[in-house]
Amino acid sequence: MDTWKFFDITHGDHMICNPTNLAKLDELIGLLDLGSEPKVLDIASGKGEFIVRVAERFGGSAGRGVEGVAVDISPFCIADLRAKASDRVPAARLEILEMDGAGYRPEAGTFDLASCMGGDWVFGGHVPTLRFLAEAARPGGCVVVGEPFWKNEPAAEYLACSGLKRDRFGSHSQNVEAGEAEGLIPWVTMVSSDDDWDRYETLQWRAAARYADSHPEDRDVPELLARVEKSRREYLNWGRDTLGWALYLFATPRR
Ligand SMILES: C[S@@+](CC[C@H](N)C(=O)[O-])C[C@H]1O[C@@H](n2cnc3c(N)ncnc32)[C@H](O)[C@@H]1O
């Protein structure tokens, strides 16, 4: 089954495609220090809820004061993002790129905000993601990443079943320390609650079940349901107690 079709179906009811709730996202946006007419970069932007909210908050009328670049590899996400941007911030100068984020080469030091929430594999992990974003952001700018962390030691059965490696993620403190090691200044973290996680995970169950009901002719349905079922077991048996998620807001040094 096409990866992006699977993601599109399972995230059909999500506004943001990570386990953060909208109140936390808005709070984080309110804490950004971007100056006037900011320039923003969002890699693995998904349906664009984050960059559109930033444009709404900092761009004035119809997002006019914001310039930005949103990059995502999924044609489904890009279509959603284009529709959302033209509906909510039609005057924002957003460049929306359907491409592999690893191939995007920003001019160093030019963005007031550089972000990547839930896409660290694009750059090969948390540290190279921080490095890329820190380089793209201007001195005195902001860097935001969304990243999982181990909140408890993962059971061997969980690792075996999910295919995750123990060293795939760090702890919450290691995620912050990684930013400091890259020369970033930790400002704020927003850790997701069980409730946030439940909403993120279980909306996928519902979306998949409803899609299967309404598309009995789709030959991808058995695989869709099998993958969601496997993910449900992993989440309920281990993931819910083991895996955390946080948004990390850092500032870049002024010089
Ligand atoms: C977990 S979602 C997060 C989306 C968005 N940042 C959010 O939090 O709502 C991961 C996103 O990464 C995108 N993605 C996956 N691989 C990518 C790549 N190599 N380059 C750019 N985007 C990618 C997916 O299409 C998806 O939209």
Image: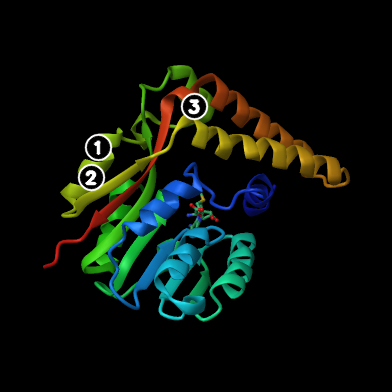
Which residue: 47% across, 44% down?
A: 20
How far is mark 1 from mark 2, CA to CA?
6 Å
Residue at image location 88% in from the left, 46% down from the top: 217
Q: Quadrant of residue 101?
A: bottom left
Asked whether the beta carbons under mark 1 and mark 2 sit within 8 Å of each other, the answer is yes
| Residue 216 vs residue 87, the one in the foreground | 87
The residue under label 2 is 178
Q: What amino acid type should be assigned to the residue bearing mark 1?
A: Gln
Quadrant hosting residue 129 = bottom left
Compared with residue 137, is residue 10 higher up or lower down, i.e. above or below? above
Three-letter amino acid code at the position of disc 2:
Ala
Q: Secondary structure at mark 1?
A: helix
Query: Considering only order in the chain, which callout, 1 or 3, is on the residue closer to the N terminus?
Result: 1
On the image, the x and y values in percent for residue 245 come to 41, 38
x, y (%) of residue 128?
Answer: 30, 53
Residue 65: quadrant of the picture:
bottom left
Q: Is residue 217 left or right of residue 108?
A: right
The residue that appears at 36% across and 43% down in the rendered structure is: 190
Density class for disc 2 (Cα within 10 Å; few <14, some 14-19, many ≥20) is: some
Check disc 3: other Cα within 10 Å, few if <14, some if 14-19, many if 20+.
many
* Observer-nearest of 230 and 48: 48
Mark 2–mark 3 contact, CB under 8 Å? no
Residue bearing the label numbered 3: 239
Q: Label 1 neighbourhood size at 10 Å, few (<14), some (14-19), many (20+)?
A: few
Q: Check disc 3 and give the amino acid type.
A: Gly
**CA gap, disc 2 to disc 3?**
23 Å
Q: Is residue 188 visible?
A: yes
Residue that label 1 marks: 174
Whether residue 117 appears in this view of the structure is no
First in sequence: mark 2 vs mark 3: 2
Q: Position of residue 156 (x, y in %)?
A: 43, 18
In the displayed structure, 109 sits above or below 184; it is below
